[in-house]
Image (cartoon, coloured by chain):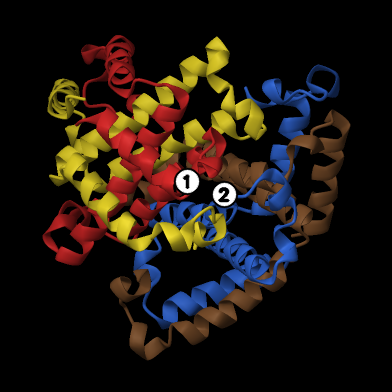
Chain colours: A red, B yellow, C brown, D blue
Amino acid sequence: MDVEKLQRALDDFAEARNWSQFHNPKNLVMALSVECAELVEEFQWLTPEQAENVMAEAGQARRVREEMADITLYLLRLADRLGVDLEAACHDKMAGNAARYPVDAFYGSARKYNR
Amino acid sequence: MDVEKLQRALDDFAEARNWSQFHNPKNLVMALSVECAELVEEFQWLTPEQAENVMAEAGQARRVREEMADITLYLLRLADRLGVDLEAACHDKMAGNAARYPVDAFYGSARKYNR
Amino acid sequence: MDVEKLQRALDDFAEARNWSQFHNPKNLVMALSVECAELVEEFQWLTPEQAENVMAEAGQARRVREEMADITLYLLRLADRLGVDLEAACHDKMAGNAARYPVDAFYGSARKYNR
Amino acid sequence: MDVEKLQRALDDFAEARNWSQFHNPKNLVMALSVECAELVEEFQWLTPEQAENVMAEAGQARRVREEMADITLYLLRLADRLGVDLEAACHDKMAGNAARYPVDAFYGSARKYNR
């Protein structure tokens, strides 16, 4: 994923509409959480089995894909505003998770996973 | 960002711990929304001005970066599970946004933006 | 539920700690959403069947009850700050829902319910 | 607030539409979080000052009141399903908060509050 290209396009889009004034970190975090909830809305009444097959129905698939795009776009916008390198942050976090959850102690355990 | 490399690493991590059983789409969407709220928590009591400077304090900066990594990781995991190409979805969404929000009609307007 | 008594106690609590300065509506809405996510966290890895029995295990039951209290308290605090009568708002909303979802057209339908 | 009366009305409403099948705790928690985000949406682009005056504009005021009703209704529905007495839970939580946040140590401190 060309993160910088998407971030430049998002910045151009906001600048053209004079929307950068609204894109402070506090507001962007709220907008990110709202987009996330719009994705949750697509799944809230589905059984786990129906959720597994959510991409098999065209209307649902389109909405899920769009909400995931919205989440990605706000996440990239926020990262741009805060100067966070998401890919490096992901690698650091995964290294931390490997140390925090040793295979032997956490094998197959959702309860330990959750706590 | 090498999305596929991160997705393979996430899959290896989950498989090694037998956690893939928990990573159905319904659960992953919930986990994504929880991580998003943990980011919101970092900003909830800050003024917009304090939020602009959130990365200037080491402890806050570390937590914000970690929460953004968690969001990214669950988003990539979900995209992998659902077969969604996030980069293509982003480009499609941005094209749709350009058509939906013409510059002239939406210049500088948060109210129209929000509705 | 004695809403006014709880609201007075919340106000006294905030005033005693000089926290009312943080309790503006924008911040309270964020805090409410964070507490809601902490409740979601208790359910995210549970199967629907495990979720039905969440109150049977003492630790889970205590945490679920506490998170529901936190949600209620922030909701009451926000209502107090905005001058919203929650009980009257609920009755109005239920009357609206009865008109919006006629029994015949929506019987047993989650899809229509969701849209 | 007559919680039991509202809970009976919600149960009658769901039963009449055969919707109780969807109202398991996992789904209700998701729905609660979605309604909460719809409230966040009303505030996301507002400055703190605009947010203070959100009830002064009729359209915003109506939407905020409706979203707060939706949150309340799902919270009451979930409490009914899980057998949680919200008022008692609130009193217990407030007693715990008084012990956890002594006035002297937390006076005027958002940072300590948040951690």
Which dot marks residue D45? 2
Gap between marks 1 and 2 measured at Cα: 8 Å
Query: Is B11 positioned to the left or the right of A45 in the image?
Result: left
Residue D101, image x, y percentages: 76, 25
Residue B38 to residue A59: above or below: above
Circle 1 residue: A31
* Residue type of the residue flagged with mark 1: Ala
- Rendering quarter of residue A77: top left
Residue at x 19%, y 58% (from the top left corner): A61
Query: Is A99 positioned to the left or the right of B15 in the image?
Result: right
Residue D107, image x, y percentages: 83, 23
- Rendering quarter of residue A14: top left
* Residue type of the residue flagged with mark 2: Trp
Of tags 1 and 2, which is closer to the observer? Answer: 2
- Rendering quarter of residue C56: top left
Q: Residues within 10 Å of mark 2 (few under 14, many from 20)?
A: many
Chain ID, mark 1: A
Q: Relative to the observer, which residue lies in front, A65 or A48? A: A65
